Image: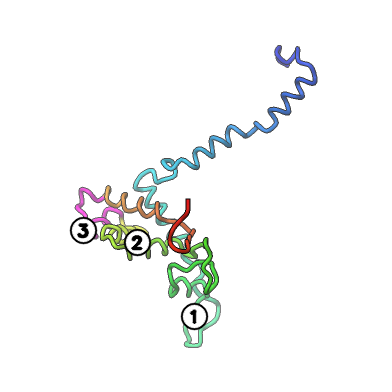
Amino acid sequence: MSRADRWKSDAQANAEALANRGRTYADRNAASLRFSWDASKRGPRDLRHACELVRRAYRDEVPTKLHESGLAPDGTPAMTAKAEAYIFGNPSWTDAGKGESPLVSFYLTPFRATMADMEKAREEATRRRAAIVAHVAFGMDPVEAATSEGCHPLDAKLVVFDALCAFLRRLTDVRVDVPGGTVAA
């Protein structure tokens, strides 16, 4: 017992204990929340980290099981429904039912949806960034990916880092469909 606590009454000690009851993790929780919402700390640290994030995003949505145990009617191994949807399906499919258009839905393959959106963009720079990201996601060396899209070798690291960061900023699994195309603030 410290000297300060020696002269406290039981009522005062209980009141302080009750006041501090919720503070056990409050300061650490507040610091964690500030860190997780700080945009400068959520982005990639460097080119290597950006490559890892893009490759992980691609790898996470590829089906792990491609074939079922039986054969298809044509004699080839039967593919799983998830694999068929991934290979032959629309990259912008969401979890909304057919014919439904909810305000908020979720992409089934967010990496592919973002890539498709970037590939059909009006700006040539966005389409070239998408090509660089695709090369990196499929395992190509980042510098080689940038130079294969016409970048000068001395600028390749900056260009590929910019392309990967632009892609990661756009990457989301949430699709928002606003009726009429305007958002009221």
* Residue where numbered disc 2 is placed: 118
Where are the magenta residues, as a range? 142-156
Which is more N-terminal, label 1 or label 2? 1
Camera-side residue of 67 and 60: 60
Where residue 102 appears, as percent x and y from the top left, is 53, 65
Crowding at mark 1 (Cα within 10 Å: few <14, some 14-19, many 20+) = some
Camera-side residue of 49 and 183: 183
Please determine whether, in this image, residue 39 is positioned above or below residue 78: above
Disc 2 residue type (three-letter):
Met
* Residue where numbered disc 1 is placed: 77
Kindly identify the residue that appears in the image at 29 percent across and 63 percent down: 122
Kindly identify the residue that appears in the image at 54 percent across and 68 percent down: 96
* Residue where numbered disc 3 is placed: 150
Task: Tell me if 13 is positioned left or right of 97 in this view.
Answer: right
Quadrant housing the N terminus: top right
Task: Tell me if 9 is positioned left or right of 111 in this view.
Answer: right
Query: Between marks 3 and 2, how big is the CA–CA gap?
Result: 18 Å
Disc 3 residue type (three-letter):
Gly
Please determine whether, in this image, residue 100 is positioned above or below residue 21: below
Where residue 19 appears, as percent x and y from the top left, is 70, 27
Under tag 1, what secondary structure?
strand
